[in-house]
Amino acid sequence: MIIIKGKYYGKEDEIMQQAKEQKLSMLKDSLYHCGEPTYRFRIGDKVLYGAFAESVVTDVIEGGKAYFLDCKNKKDAMPLMRSAIWTEVRPVDA
């Protein structure tokens, strides 16, 4: 159990799941306007996202309209969880 500013949080996995659910609810508002994907990726695919050196798809949302990614910079050892609409993600070989 983790306590931050008087609030109780569960284990690290539970915190990650809560963060994922929160990001998913924010993404769903944008999915209505994003259209059908030109690019589709599968879990485990390496993709280009922002300025990150390495990004890997961890979850596919709404048939490829959005993705959860694990992103790393060269200097960072821990991957950062990011959510992205398909228009923000590109194949590595494009």
Image (cartoon, helix red, strand yellow):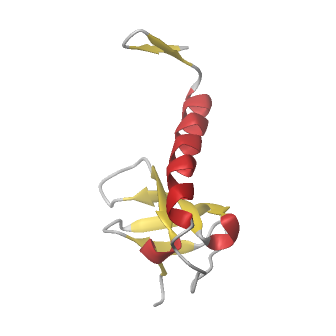
Q: In the rendering, at what x and y percent does residue 65 appear?
A: 60, 70
Residue at 70% x, 70% y: name it. Answer: 63
Q: Residue at x 47, y 65 (%)?
A: 55
Of 36 and 77, the residue lying toward us:
36
- Quarter of the picture containing the N terminus is top right
Which residue is painted at 60% across and 72% down in the image?
Answer: 45
Q: Is 32 positioned to the left or the right of 88 in the image?
A: right
Q: Quadrant of residue 43?
A: bottom right
Residue 66, above or below 77: below
Of residues 40 and 77, the one drawn nearer to the viewer in this rendering = 40
Q: Residue at x 56, y 48 (%)?
A: 25
Q: Percent from the top left, x then y, of residue 36? A: 61, 81
Q: Position of residue 78 (x, y in %)?
A: 43, 47
**Badge count:** 0
Rendered location of residue 5, percent (x, y): 36, 13
Q: Nearer the viewer, residue 24 or 60?
A: 24
Is residue 40 rendered to the left or right of residue 74? Answer: right
Residue at the outermost bottom position: 94
Name the quadrant containing residue 62. Answer: bottom right
| Residue occupying the far top of the picture | 6
Is residue 93 shown above or below 66?
A: below
